[in-house]
Image (spheres, rainbow, N blue to C red):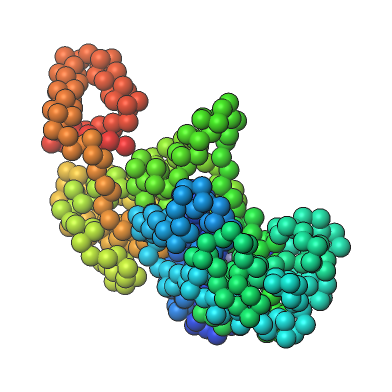
Amino acid sequence: MAIRVYNTLTRQKEPFEPLNPPRVGIYLCGPTVYKPSHIGHAVGPIIFDCVKRYLQFRGYDVTLVINVTDVDDKLIIEADAQNTTVPELAERILGSYLDAMNQLGIDSIDLMPKASEHIGDICDNIQKLIDNDVAYVSGQDVYFDVTRDDDYGKLSSRKVEDQTEHRDVVGETKRNPSDFALWKAAKPDEPDSVIYDSPWGRGRPGWHIECSAMSTRYLGDTFDIHGGGMDLIFPHHENEIAQAESATNKTFVKYWLHHGLTRFNTKKISKSDADMQEALKKMTLSHLLTEFTGEQLRYFVISTHYRRPIEFSDAELDAKKKGLATFHRLFERIERVTQTDLFSQPADSEDEWKSAEKCDADFAGEVDAFAMRFVEMMDDDFNTAGAIATLFDFANRANRFIEENKLETEDNVRARETAIAATRELMRMGQLLGLFRKRAEVSAVGDDELVGKLMGILIDARAQSRKAKQFDIADSIRDQLTDAGVALEDRPDGTLWRIE
Ligand SMILES: [Zn+2]
């Protein structure tokens, strides 16, 4: 089966046929580094990290470019408010963004070009547009003339004459209200650190031209996939298409992939500014990464299909955290009953499962079916939510296999080997989504010596109650621990506990 992707440009799913297979070029609009990133800013990088991993698994040679917008009015305003310089602000915010990307396991980005380091490319692009008579100089500004581009609006289905909104302030120097800035003249009071030289005077580029200049610089005039949030379709991506295609007379991008936006429930928190500030702080990546692991946040994001909105709430985060724990419990169980270190070697070989000597033909057939289903899901417009659901069924089946073969109590070498190979197969698939790359981190509280002792006392009290047939007391201890987020597992050699 072929991979199919939903293309915003054609509004339908299409077979994925790269321009120059096996090479695939992907460009994703990255952060504007002026304020701390929140969970919504991580969605694109997580999704496209999964897309790249999956395409590589399907035999493609993928280049993933995510830009950094460090030249923008927003940076000037924020640096001024913080009484600092634009370069200092940009470096600091980018540093914390990269740290978050690292914790989220996003390590597949090939290039992160910065706008400030591509002013020459940007000016070359603007000059081409002026030469092609689709852009005009007005004072020391340069504008793109939307009326000179016949198919302007094709991505967002907007017609020039229908447009009432536009990002740039309407200047008297524009020919048409919808024309957008390619180059903006420096204002008198702006610091040197945000001003660049150009053939049209000192100033800085518009945001849209930064992206078309950097994407074509690294991926060529025409490339395969351009991604971004749905909020970027208009005007940003529409303008990118207009600029790139008017400069080269070639198709800019074959497939446009847009991800859904993150929805925050602000009903409860809109009482006061202070509440709102507190709520916004809770959504920043730096804060979330103190409460959740990078893997938990990644799992939270990819549990929803990328084109759908992600509902951000404590309840959703908690539910997904529990979902992910199911897999790590299985890995822990397999490691314990088989005395194997599942994480010691990368589970990236398909051959292990294929060559494994399986003890049970039915189970083996089911594992193969899970693997096929996983591929079908991912082939269908990178349906990570469906892929995770498949892994869930797989994990449940693997747990059942352990029980059916009494692996916890009986020594059955072939069943044990089968269980290990099947679990590695499950891990291999999860790793295509960037999951299961290391053992689940034990909560810091779990390491605490006192907590360990107290848990020992509670487990002992529960065992004594059961011995005395006071099952209501024993059950109450377990239930209360469950409510507190502690799971107990009874095993032949005693009871173990774990923070969920
Ligand atoms: Zn962009």
Q: Is residue 389 visible?
A: no
At horizontal 18% and vertical 48% (from top left) the residue drawn is 336
Image quarter of residue 225 = bottom right
The residue at 27%/56% (across/down) is: 438
Expressed as whole percent of the image width and height from the top left, the position of residue 472 reads 28, 14
The quarter of the image holding the N terminus is: bottom right
- The number of callouts visible is 0
Q: On the rendering, which quadrant does ligand 1 occupy? A: bottom right
Quarter of the picture holding the C terminus: top left
Residue 250 percent coordinates (x, y): 69, 84
How far across and how far down the image is residue 301, in percent? 48, 50
- Which residue is at the front of the view, 255 or 384? 255
- Residue 401 at least partly seen: yes
Q: Nearer the viewer, residue 215 or 458?
A: 215
Q: In the image as oriented, which residue stretches furthest toward the right? A: 161
Q: Residue at x 83, y 72 (%)?
A: 147
Q: Is residue 403 or residue 389 the one in the foreground?
A: 389
Identify the residue at horizontal 20%, vertical 61% (top origin).
344
Q: Is residue 415 above or below residue 324?
A: below
Quarter of the rendering containing residue 486: top left
Foreground of the two, 209 or 235? 209
Q: Examine the image and state in which quarter residue 433 appears.
A: bottom left
